[in-house]
Amino acid sequence: MYFAIIGDIIGSKQVKNRAEIQNKLKTILNQINLKYANEISANFIVTIGDEFQGLLATPQILLDIINEIKFKIYPIRIRIGIGIGSIDTEIDKKMAIGADGPAYHFARKMIDEIRLNEKGKMSDSTNIKIYAEGKTSILNLINSNLCLCSFIESKWTNKQCDLIKEDMLFKQNQRELAKKFNLVQSSVQRRFKSAGYYDYINAWEIINKVIVEEWGVNDVK
């Protein structure tokens, strides 16, 4: 079983300095490939335009990787489709391209659904979706919670997001964050609370726990 990730930049054609953003994305993906080299089955690469993909054999680092891409590319927004399933072809560790199978098909299906949803009059805030065969109720629960997390993110102010980004990427405590942003600790706590950050983190951790419990047993040889 594999975990395919396909992502792209939202509204990429309207992004200023597009070439600069593409280079930044490539740098982020290279950093991830180095950091998680032992867990990645096929390295993350930019494929077509502003689209990227990668392949994992374990779900334990799935959401960590997504968070790193999401927060390092901020304020640029991305959408991500995740597919859980088999890979029918040979896998090249150096790049997540050329391989094919249900995992990639499911990830592509999720990206397409997000794009279609964005065009709807009653569209939700979803920018991450996950799919696998079976376990429909669990997948619906996961995707509903991912949607709520996306909604919370969409309401963050720049100041809130700067603090959250620092906390998510570097795991600093509130005193360290306060010192770095020239704030008192109580101000950091208030910003986190008003941003719904504690609820967000709790939901994110539960999502990760469910994914690992349901798909963490790996039969890849």
Image: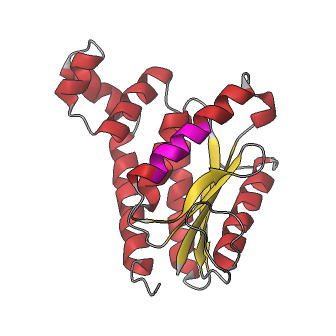
- Magenta span: predominant SS is helix
Tell whether position 139 is magenta. no
- The residue shown at (44%, 79%) is 215
Q: Report the number of numbered marks.
A: 0
Quarter of the image where one finds residue 97:
bottom right
Quarter of the image where one finds residue 160:
top left
Decide if residue 72 is on the left or right side of residue 110.
Answer: left
Q: Is residue 9 above or below residue 61?
A: above
Decide if residue 169 is on the left or right side of residue 176.
Answer: right
Magenta segment: 25-33
Q: Is residue 3 above or below residue 171?
A: below
Q: Position of residue 126 (x, y in %)?
A: 63, 51
Q: Is residue 125 visible?
A: no
**Camera-side residue of 46 and 161:** 46
**Camera-side residue of 100 and 216:** 100
Q: Position of residue 140 (x, y in %)?
A: 57, 71
Tell whether position 32 is magenta. yes
Q: Is residue 39 visible?
A: yes
**Camera-side residue of 173 and 69:** 69
Decide if residue 30 is on the left or right side of residue 120.
Answer: left
Q: Position of residue 50 (x, y in %)?
A: 73, 43
Q: Position of residue 197 (x, y in %)?
A: 37, 40
Way the structure is coloured = secondary structure
- The residue shown at (64%, 57%) is 53
Q: Is residue 137 above or below residue 180?
A: below
Decide if residue 195 is on the left or right side of residue 170.
Answer: right
**Camera-side residue of 206 and 84:** 84
